[in-house]
Amino acid sequence: MKGRIGLRITSSILFLFSFILFLSGCILQRRSMHTLERYYDTMPLPETHPLALEKKRRKIQAENPTPSSGNKNYNHGGNQRILSTSSRQRTSQDLIWEQRQQQLEMELRREKERYRTVGYVQLVDDFTSVCSAVLTFNDLDRVGSKASRILIYPESWDMQLEISESQQKEAQKTLAIQEKTLNNKRKQKNTKKKNKKKNKKQEEATKPSHEEATNPLDPPPLIHETSAADKSPQYHTARRLLHLARIKHSAILLPMPDDTVTPLVLLNMTDYKRLLYLRHPAVIMKNMDEMLLHSPAAAVSAPRDRGGGLSSNFLMVAPEDGELEYVMKKGGVITKDFGGLGKVVERIYAATAMILPRWPYEIFTSDFFDSPVGNGGNRASTWLPSKVLNEVYYIFFDGGKKTKNGEWEKVPQPWTLKSLEEDVAPRCQSAQEMGDGEERWDCTARNVWMTLYDGYRQRRMEVCGLDLEA
Ligand SMILES: *[C@@H]1O[C@H](CO)[C@@H](O)[C@H](O)[C@H]1NC(C)=O
């Protein structure tokens, strides 16, 4: 009897204590949960963190209780209630998300349209200059321009490059895929080179099979014989490059009657708000989209040239109905000589043109030959060769230099030089130190000039191919 009572007492004591233990565990756990929650409330979390998402959901729920929340009471059973509110929550969130998506798409479309209405124009009037035009488009890609690119050439060339829009898209897609695989291959090769040199032979063995596939950069086949092809061996190269400009650089090809292939024709291209004619050969160092999108609506804008007139190389135009007719009436003989453009524009727009500062918009390679101090005037005082590569927008290869007597002397263009070692680069200038009278040499102009020339030569080979180099 006594033993049983003892057993009962001990078991009830045991039960009591384990119950107390259980209770205190519960309380402790709740407390720590609370502190955890408070901690996460004050902690900044990444948006994708599940807790952050949950917090956001709760906040939204608290801020705009869905109309259905009043109906909750009609639901039976807790589980069902939770399910129905969360699915409603999701649909309302989906709606918000969809709206945002639509807004974003609309903005993108609007932006695309804005960029479509401004553009860079290249004009070519002989086969050999097509490469220079393509190079400027390549530069535009490099500086991240999103504006249109337009390439105008004479109709009489009879290039037969018409392809449908879907064909163009298809070719562009194929090209993108090819470039991607090529990049991947290059990466693989590089890593493999580091690991083993033996694999190299295998890589080369697999190479040709890829090249056999149709090349999206091949122009469409000729439909009929053309006399232009017989006249010039460069016809096919020019044709290939025009097609390349369209596929690789999304250029709009625009054949025009021969006598209208002049920068002034831009005035009549009223599908566009602003167009920028850039003479080649040149290198574009900076994106000028912003200028095209936001500059004042002057009919023409240009920097001044050395003589105080308007530049023949850099002309921004706001096309307008009837403007070209006006220019022709005013006796602007539309010269085929692009270099003479400045004079025509100067005569007609002297009072109304918007003048852009020459620096940093336009410089010439011949500028590097002039001593920064010795020049008599129209150069900005802040011009320094060392600033060119970082600050300038456009550099024209004018293929010459001024001699000491003020005469113009020809300097070979980058692609006609056999090597940069030829002694045509600007010389280092002696810079006398004020203090000790010691002579030092400043070679900045020479080095920058060499960089530009070397870069142009290389890009020309890379972009246009080797068949030009012969
Ligand atoms: C300007 O363009 C319009 C239509 O686009 C055309 O009718 C007109 O002949 C063009 N003017 C000149 C001078 O080429």
Image (cartoon, grey):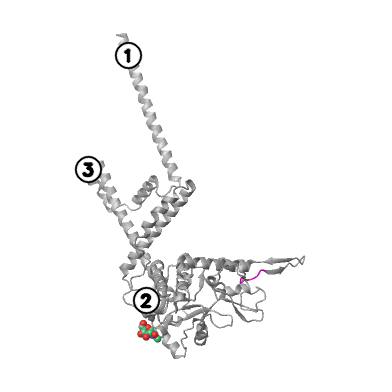
Helix, strand or loop under label 3: loop
Q: Quadrant of residue 417?
A: bottom right
Label 3 and label 1: CA atoms lie apart by: 47 Å
Q: Main secondary structure of the magenta part?
A: loop
**Quick one: label 3 or label 1, which is nearer the N terminus?**
1
Q: Nearer the viewer, residue 278 or 429?
A: 429
Does ligand 1 reach within 8 Å of label 1's beta carbon? no
Which amino acid does the dot numbered 1 rest on?
Leu
Q: Quadrant of ligand 1?
A: bottom left
Tell me the tag on residue 76. Answer: 3
Q: Which residue is mark 2?
A: 159
Residue 46 visible (yes or no): yes
Residue type of the residue flagged with mark 3? His
Which of the image's four quarters has the N terminus? top left
**The image quarter in which residue 398 lies:** bottom right
- Residues in magenta? 424-428
**Which amino acid does the dot numbered 2 rest on?**
Met
User: Horizontally, is 407 left or right of 311 in the view?
Assistant: right
Q: Which of the pair 456/43 is nearer the observer?
A: 456
Name the residue tied to disc 1.
Answer: 7
The x, y position of residue 371, in whole percent, is 66, 73
**Is residue 391 within the magenta segment?**
no
Mark 3 or mark 2: whose residue is earlier in sequence? 3
Q: Is residue 232 left or right of residue 373?
A: left
